[in-house]
Structure formats: structure tokens, C-alpha cells
Image (cartoon, rainbow, N blue to C red):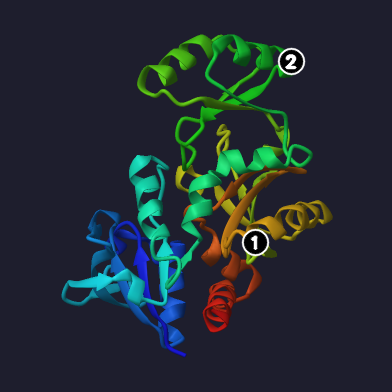
Amino acid sequence: MALRIAFQMDPIQGVNINADSSFRLAEEAQARGHELFVYTPDKLTFDEGRVVARAHPLRVQRVQGDHAHLGPEVRLDLAALDVVWLRQDPPFDMAYITTTHLLDLIRDTTLVVNDPFWVRNYPEKLLVLQFPDLTPPTMIARNLDEIRDFKHRHGDIILKPLYGNGGAGVFRLDAGDRNLSSLHELFTGFSREPLIVQKFLPAVSKGDKRVILVNGEPVGAINRVPAAGETRSNMHVGGRPEKVSLTDRDREICAAIGPLLRDRGQVFVGIDVIGDWLTEINLTSPTGIQELERFDGINVAARIWEAIETKRADA
């Protein structure tokens, strides 16, 4: 059955077709005969009871620079579509949160992936707090004395914005570091949000594993190894992707969190695991599909679409 699908995402014209997961999802959907549209979040509107978007029909091809062909702009009633993909990148700010509230309004007729209600209520650095046995020592705080006490207990810590993304603003403060007060002053000077503090995990030097789950089940993982002299493993700051297998501990983590993700409509999720510890559960705009497909020779995008097509058939 052909589906009518819209991608809510950042401009598709600027994506890297060899790395971007949204492009890969669109490519697979097109191959399966589905009708595609695309729009940016600023084109989403609530108008007298209807949720609409000024969107473009979309056709994709794997030719960088000529990879997205957009048709004339149309005004789509999103409640008349089969699927809307919530795929814009963070920051997870009030603009992002507002789009989840608007997309909530079409949940009775349109499958929104991932479910916007739970994307809004499960920010990646907060959802892990429900699984303290799986995570490293963690603190969410704004008060400097509390953060100092945590650092005193653990010595070597990671300090980062609670709603940051892509490795931005991530600092390692080891036992001899004297910059905590200055960094706290910097962060609290431009934001009222708390910070997240975690015990530093030396195993990060061997990689920060991204495990991809589809409908709560792990399908594989890639390892992201930090560049020399770098704490962050994010690929856009120099992290190197490597082939890696799922360990028994990875499967234990997935078994613990998978049912919750499935029950909350989180079809495509990427979790971050350092050593034996879960550090983030990424719901907003997970990545890693293309790297995993290249390393393991599996069609991850097809598995995601099979899960979505089944949900639509059962609706």
C-alpha cells in the first residue's frame, strides 16, 4: 500500500547524502513506492483547527548536489497524510517543543514518527534518569555548590548543557582542573536551564557506541572513536566510525529500555553506550543508519519502514 509521507526537517538540499539518516529514510520510502513531501519547521501552521504545512513534493536520488528535486509548493493538511516524520535537528528549544504540540493534534489520523508527545516528554539526557542501574553517576543541577560536591566525589567529570546536541559545550574537568566556576558562570549567564554532570568514563577513548533500535529492538551498532586529544566522539567533530558488534551488556540495556520505547511510539531510536554504561537515549533526530548499513550489510531503513507500514496497516 502506497503511503503519503511528509518529512519535517531542516533543508534537505544541504544534507550529506552519504551520512544523513533522513535522506536514507526518504530514499527507501521512494523505493517502496510511497509519495513524499518535505517541509521545514517554520512552514508548520495551526489554522482554525487544522494543522497544515507549506510543503514540496519530493523526489530523491543519490547524486550529491542534485539529490533532492522539489515540486511546486502545496499547502498540505497533515491530518490527511499517512505519516509525518519529525526529523529536524535539535536544539531542543521552545520552537522544537511547539512543533511537537502541533503535531500532537493529528495523532488520531496520522502516524507521527517518533511520537511527538513522548519526544517532548523524554529529552535524551533526561530519559536515562529512569534507568539509574544502567547509567554512570549523574547529576542534573544548576547550583554550583551541588556540582562542586559531585566533582569532589568523582574527581573526573563531564559537564555539558542539558539540552545541547552534537557535542557542543561538552567539557571534561579532571581532578586538577580549575575551570568549573568559570564554566558555570558562562553557562548560567546565557541560560536558565540546569546542567548535566556525569562521571567521566575512561572507556570513551575506545569509542562511544551508537546502538540503533527499531520499535524497541536492537538492529546493530557502530562505534564512534574520538580523534586524538578529543573527548567528544561525535563524527562532525572528528569522531571516526568503526564496525562493532553488540555485546551482552548492550543487549541487556536494550532489553531494559526497549519495551518502554516501543510502548511510547518511538520507532527509530539511537542510544549511546560508553563501556558498559548508557549515557543518552536519542529520540529527536537519531543518526547512524548509513554507517550501520555499510558496516553490517543490512537494510536498516527497510526495517524502519516495515515497522511503520505495519503500524499503518494495523491502525
| Residue displayed at 48% across by 15% down | 184
User: Looking at the rendering, in which quadrant would you find the C terminus?
Assistant: bottom right
Return the residue found at the far left: 72
Q: Vertical placement of 136 versus 147: above or below?
A: below
Instruction: Tell me residue 296's x, y (percent).
Output: 65, 70
Task: Inspect the image, locate mark 2, and give the three-letter code of the amino acid beneath it.
Answer: Arg
> Which residue corresponds to mark 2?
153
Return the residue found at the far bottom: 1
2 or 1: tag closer to the N-terminus: 2
The answer to whether any part of residue 14 appears in the image is yes
SS at badge 2? helix
| Residue displayed at 76% across by 42% down | 134
Task: Inspect the image, locate mark 1, and give the three-letter code of the amino acid beneath it.
Answer: Asp
Instruction: Tell me residue 137's x, y (percent).
Output: 72, 29
The answer to which of 308 and 238 lies nearer the viewer is: 308
> Which residue corresponds to mark 1?
263
Q: Which mark is residue 31?
A: none
Q: Is residue 265 left or right of residue 85?
A: right
Instruction: Tell me residue 124's x, y (percent).
Output: 56, 44
